[in-house]
Image (cartoon, grey):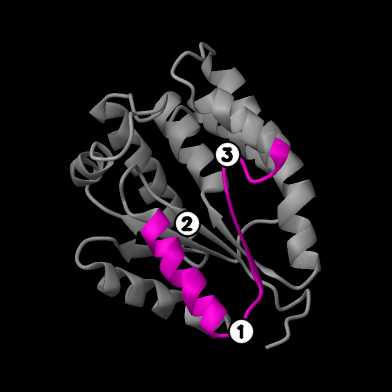
Amino acid sequence: MSQTATEAKFISFEGTEGVGKTTAINSLCQRLTDAGIDYVRTREPGGSPFAEQLRELLLDTKTDINDDTEMLLMFAARSDHLAKVILPALEAGKWVVCDRFVDSTVAYQGYGRGLGDAAMLNKIEGLINQFVPRLPDLTLWLDLPVEEGMQRAGKRSAADRFEQQKMAFFERVYQGFSQQHQAHPQRIHRIDAKGEVEDVAARIWQAVSPQL
């Protein structure tokens, strides 16, 4: 199946820790492959060589930076990611499947770090308007109770700088995703992330297939 630049879609996955994004993305990418759709799979923070260097810094438990610095590093990584990976792929007619994008910045830095304070949210919105020329066509928010997700995440490798935060932090992050879903229901689709992997994958495909 050939894709033109106008047909190429930008799909992002969002959610708190341990919601199953990696497994869900694996399933979607297999579906896209089966449908004959060329795509680029990427992630944030990261995705480009420079952005991956910033990712290591941001996730390192030894990194000691304030909230504004963290937010600005996220956007520095995103700017390079967009320029080097996302926009060229879309222009070439390839779909882009991204593990996290701007909604995570609003949720983690705006609500998690910034407590949902209007000043921090306004800073983030201003940076999005200035440095993000393309938003996803579809965002899949994997909705899972925070405690359940943290239990899943705890079974993985050692906690990174974000995963070490307290439960109250992730409750605020969850609120951030919920608020964005309410504000942008046409772009952000809530996916029930509870249940069997196959069931979650089917819900995701139901949301994505109209984009074909």
Labels 2 and 1: the sequence-earlier one: 2
- Residue that badge 1 annotates: 36
Instruction: Give the residue drawn at x 48%, y 78%.
Output: 31
The answer for how far apart the CA atoms under marks 3 and 2 are is: 13 Å
> Which quadrant holds the C terminus?
bottom right
Picture coordinates of residue 32 (x, y %)?
Answer: 54, 77
Res 78 → quadrant: top right
Residue 184 sits above or below residue 73 on the image: below
- Using a 10 Å C-alpha cutoff, classify the residue at mark 2 as few (fewer than 14 neighbours), some (14 to 19) or many (20 or more): many
Residue type marked 2: Phe
Q: Which residue is mark 3?
A: 45
Residue shown at 22% from the left, 48% from the top: 145
Q: Amino acid at mark 3?
A: Pro
> What residue is rendered at 40% in x and 42% in y?
176
Q: Label 2 belongs to which residue?
A: 13
Q: Is residue 46 magenta?
A: yes
Residue span colored magenta: 22-49
User: Looking at the image, can residue 126 be seen?
Assistant: no
- Between the C-alphas of marks 3 and 1, the distance is 28 Å
In the foreground, 204 or 107: 204
Q: Nearer the viewer, residue 124 or 27?
A: 27
Q: Report if residue 120 lies within the magenta region.
A: no
Asked if residue 107 lies left or right of residue 87, the reply is left
Q: Position of residue 158 (x, y in %)?
A: 33, 29
Local SS, label 3: loop
Give the residue displayed 73% in from the left and 81% down from the top.
3
> In the displayed structure, would residue 62 be above or below residue 198?
above
- Quadrant showing the N terminus: bottom right
Mark seen at residue 62: none
Q: Amino acid at mark 1?
A: Gly
